[in-house]
Amino acid sequence: MRDELRPRVLIVEDEPLVLLELEDTLTELGYRVVDSARDLVTGLILAAELDFDVAVLDVNLAGLSSAKIADLLRENGVPFLLITGYTAAGIPERLRSALRVPKPCESSTLSRALGDLLGDKSHRNTLS
């Protein structure tokens, strides 16, 4: 698929190894990672300034909630999914209705979740 046709993804994840794995997995699944952030402030800046189709957000960024980034994305109509090792009880109330994928992320689960968010069935079963 031509690069400009691939869905563009912003990743916000504070764990370097998880971030690298997400970048690799998303690229293998046919997405284009436009940028990534490892902290809340950078995530807010990138979410406000970049052009992308969907975001993948870690719930907990070095002890801070990614809820402010999620709020900004909702205001701008950008779909996002949460990746987390927490149960619903460990997720801020206003994020509990968001689509979640557990850590560690299985590539097939990530593919289906992003496909659901984007309404793109071509990515749903990429690695099933």
Image: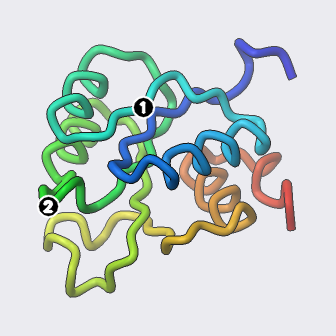
* In this picture, residue 128 sits left or right of residue 46: right
Query: Element under label 2?
Result: loop
Could you say where residue 58 lies in the image, as x and y percent from the top left? 35, 56
Which image quarter holds the C terminus? bottom right
Residue ranking furthest to the front: 17
Check disc 2 and give the amino acid type. Answer: Gly
* In this picture, residue 63 sits left or right of residue 105: left
Quote the CA–CA distance across marks 1 and 2: 18 Å
Q: Is residue 37 above or below residue 127?
A: above
Which image quarter holds the N terminus? top right
Residue at position x 12%, y 56% in the image: 64
| Residue assigned mark 1 | 36
Residue at position x 39%, y 60% in the image: 82
| Residue assigned mark 2 | 63
Quadrant location of residue 55?
top left
Frontmost residue, 61 versus 117: 61
Could you say where residue 126 lies in the image, as x and y percent from the top left? 85, 54
Of label 1 and label 2, which has the lower sequence position?
1
* In this picture, residue 82 sits left or right of residue 72: right
Check disc 1 and give the amino acid type. Answer: Ser
- Crowdedness of circle 1 by 10 Å Cα count: few (<14), some, many (20+)? many
Frontmost residue, 113 versus 91: 91
Residue at position x 55%, y 71% in the image: 104
Could you say where residue 49 lies in the image, as x and y percent from the top left? 28, 14
